[in-house]
Image: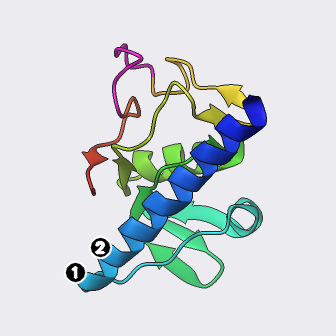
């Protein structure tokens, strides 16, 4: 059923984030998780950096997600246009991901015409972590 399927996908995303966190920590890579609400309210792009409150970032990693807000997508597109580095998890299944609850289309995937079975149909490079 739909609820069970969503719960399974949410658990998969959460598990994937835990693995990513562990990999970053073990590798000595400092990181933060951005809260979507605070990023929408406080996020801006300035001189190629994504600023959220007092923090400024040169790199953004989009982990495995089920939904992302259109405001965050617009912010990330601006960040990318100003030279910010964005990486997309190869675990993202763009047949299931949505923006503001709507399925991702070629237009929202950066206009790239790629097979819908591709692991990452964003305009950003894909990264892999088991």
Residue 58: tell me if it is visible.
Answer: no
Q: Which residue is mark 2?
A: 23
Q: Are marks 1 and 2 in contact (CB under 8 Å)?
A: yes
Q: Residue at x 44, y 41 (%)?
A: 92
For the residue labelled by badge 2, is the local secondary structure a helix, a strand or a loop? helix
Residue 113 covered by magenta stretch: yes
Residue 97: image location, x then y, percent: 58, 34
56, above or below 3, in the image: below
Pointer 2 local density, CA inside 10 Å: few below 14, some 14–19, many at least 20: some
Look at the picture and state if 92 lies above or below 15: above
To which quarter of the image does residue 38 belong? Answer: bottom right
Residue behind mark 1: 27
Query: Residue at point 35% right, 41% down?
Result: 124
Q: Nearer the viewer, residue 79 or 103?
A: 103
Please indicate, yes or no, whether residue 123 appears anywhere in the rendered image. yes
Q: Quadrant of the N terminus?
A: top right
- Name the quadrant of the C terminus: bottom left
Left or right of 29? Residue 65 is right
Which residue is depicted at the point 48% across and 50% down? 64
Q: Nearer the viewer, residue 7 or 97?
A: 7
Q: Which residues are magenta?
A: 111-119
Q: Residues within 10 Å of mark 1 (few under 14, many from 20)?
A: few
């Amino acid at each position: 059923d739909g609820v069970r399927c969503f719960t399974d996908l949410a658990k998969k995303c959460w598990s994937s984030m835990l693995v990513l966190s562990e990999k970053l920590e073990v590798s000595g890579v400092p990181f933060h998780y951005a809260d979507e609400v605070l990023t929408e309210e406080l996020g801006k792009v300035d001189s190629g950096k994504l600023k959220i409150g007092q923090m400024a970032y040169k790199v953004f990693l989009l982990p495995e997600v089920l939904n992302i807000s259109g405001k965050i997508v617009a912010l990330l597109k601006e960040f990318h246009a100003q030279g910010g580095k964005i990486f997309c998890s190869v675990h993202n299944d763009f047949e299931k991901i949505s923006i503001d609850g709507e399925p991702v289309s070629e237009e929202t995937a950066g206009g790239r015409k790629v097979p819908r079975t591709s692991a990452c149909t964003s305009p950003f490079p894909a990264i892999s972590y088991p």
